[in-house]
Image: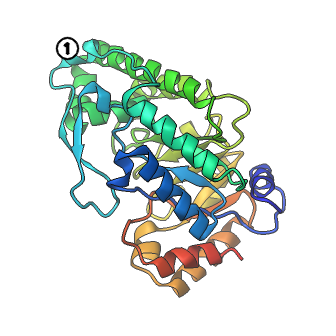
Amino acid sequence: MDKRERLTRTIAGEATDRVPVALWRHWPGDDQRAADLARSVVEFQKTYDWDIVKVTPASSYLIVDYGVQDVWEGNLEGTRTYIKRAVSRSLDWTELRPLDPARGSLGKQLECLNLVCESLKDDDAPIVATIFSPLAQAKNIAGKDLLTRHLRTHPDRVHTGLNTLTETTLRYVDALKRTGISGIFYAVQHASYDVLSEDEYKTFGLPYDRKILEALPGKWWFNLLHLHGESPMFRLCSQFPVQAINWHDQETEPDLPTGKSMFNGAVCGGLSRWQHVHHGTPSAIREQARNAINQTNARRFILSTGCVSMITSPLSNLRAVREAVE
């Protein structure tokens, strides 16, 4: 059974030869150059033969051309530290303008994706491009605390900015249609009760997320929603038009069986990126993988972690994740 058939049957709840499996990670330093990021992603795939190829750029790639600056300071997740924001006063939201996806950072990411698609043309695993939600982009543009303050004190100005970020993202999605990807990894960070109230997310997040996800082309057969953080608004987001949902199921509710009961597609997780993949052992990973497979009856389930794996996790543990489904 090839990877596309395996995933298609998994999404539909049908029996497969084995459970699909995938890990992904950041590539600090390499994520600043299209060719280097592409090479790292391709080598990672050729080493482990995952069922999904998730291309992970720096979180700033969608917004760096608005004037933000970030640096690599050694974070274990491989994420960069923001040292300059593009919004410091509420009026700045109204001064953002849509970006051209063929130029600057967005153009470099399109180049990277084309290189990955060309290098893996004989691998039938879906290649998925990472897109951060407009609200997540806004958080990186202004900083978490300032964004929260502005959306509560100057909501109209924030909406103006979110509309601009959404327009840029839609232009980028349109450009992605001309690459060979099979879908997107859509990262939502604010559909969490620890971050916003449900009413706030319905006002500042949900409409923009729906606009982007509903614009995805039908030919993209594998779109994965990532709900970041604890206390996700899972039931609300389970209605999004995606084929799979990934969340921190080992650290927060819902658990895998409950998540499956609220969503028609595949649930993706089962392993803790810290407890199992980073600090654990191969035997502990194999045991947890068996538990997750049993909990889901090996149907509508993709074995993974709730978020990116650490850049220094033991290679023996990565190999154990891949081998756990064989």
Residue under the point 46% across and 18% down: 167
Q: Residues within 10 Å of mark 1 (few under 14, many from 20)?
A: some
- Up-down: is 93 above or below 134? above
Horizontally, residue 172 falls left or right of residue 201, namely right
Look at the image and name its color scheme.
Answer: rainbow
- Up-down: is 276 above or below 239? below
Which part of the image, by quadrant, shows the C terminus?
Answer: bottom right
Q: Nearer the viewer, residue 156 or 18?
A: 18
Residue under the point 74% across and 54% down: 7
Horizontally, residue 147 falls left or right of residue 201, namely left
Q: Nearer the viewer, residue 147 or 74?
A: 74
Under tag 1, what secondary structure? helix
Horizontally, residue 303 falls left or right of residue 146, namely right
Residue under the point 51% across and 21% down: 171
Tag 1: residue type?
Leu
> Where on the picture, by quarter, is residue 177?
top right
Residue 78 at x, y percent in the picture:
34, 58
Residue 125 at x, y percent in the picture:
69, 54
Q: Is residue 186 visible?
A: no
Question: Looking at the image, how many numbered discs can be counted on the residues?
Answer: 1
Extreme residue in the bottom direction: 283
Horizontally, residue 155 falls left or right of residue 214, namely left
Residue under the point 23% across and 28% down: 67
Residue 105 at x, y percent in the picture:
38, 33
Q: Which residue is label 1 attached to?
A: 91
Q: Nearer the viewer, residue 107 or 196?
A: 107
Q: Is residue 276 visible?
A: yes
Which part of the image, by quadrant, shows the N terminus?
Answer: bottom right
Residue 83 at x, y percent in the picture:
16, 41
